[in-house]
Image (cartoon, rainbow, N blue to C red):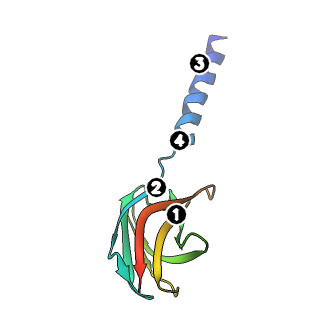
Amino acid sequence: MKTLLLIAAVLCLVAGLFAFQPLPRCSALEPETGKAGDAVSAKGENLDKASVSELYLTDGSKDTKVAITGQTGTEVKFTIPQVKPGRYHLALLTANKMSMIEQPVVLTIE
């Protein structure tokens, strides 16, 4: 009986560790202004492939997928797609494809 309880406790602990995944977060863009075809770097934390599967620009009504050209835990590099000029937030699709998280950084496209 004690062995069974110990195994159950260990399984719960392991499941809890895998269930908690830190959320990806962008805190800065370099540069903050650009045009279609320009390279941009989003800096932050938990941005690796294990946390982020896709990246989008959103104007609040339309999301446009961007091509990721490089990705580490602290940086995602991408190319600005062909979109109309304006201000866009970055949105990250988590690796488990369960959540789209809009980021507090803004890219101005000329």
Q: Relative to 74, is 9 above or below?
A: above
Q: Give the CA separation, mark 4 to mark 1.
A: 18 Å
What kind of element bears circle 1?
A: strand
Residue that badge 2 annotates = 24
Q: Nearer the viewer, mark 1 or mark 3?
A: 1
- Residue 85, image x, y percentages: 47, 85
Alpha-carbon neighbours of circle 4 within 10 Å: few (<14), some, or many (≥20)? Answer: few
Q: Earlier in the sequence, mark 3 or mark 4?
A: 3
Q: Amino acid at mark 2?
A: Pro
Report x, y in % for residue 91: 52, 65
Q: Residue at x 51, y 61 (%)?
A: 102
Q: CA distance from mark 1 to mark 3?
A: 39 Å
The residue identified by callout 4 is: 20
User: What kind of residue is marked 4?
Assistant: Phe
Q: Which mark is residue 92?
A: 1
Q: Is 90 situated left or right of 74 in this image?
A: right
In the picture provided, is 66 more to the left or to the right than 3? left
Q: Kindly check if marks 1 and 3 are in contact, taking CB atoms under 8 A apart as contact.
A: no
> Label 3: how many residues lie within 10 Å, few (<14), some (14-19) or many (20+)?
few
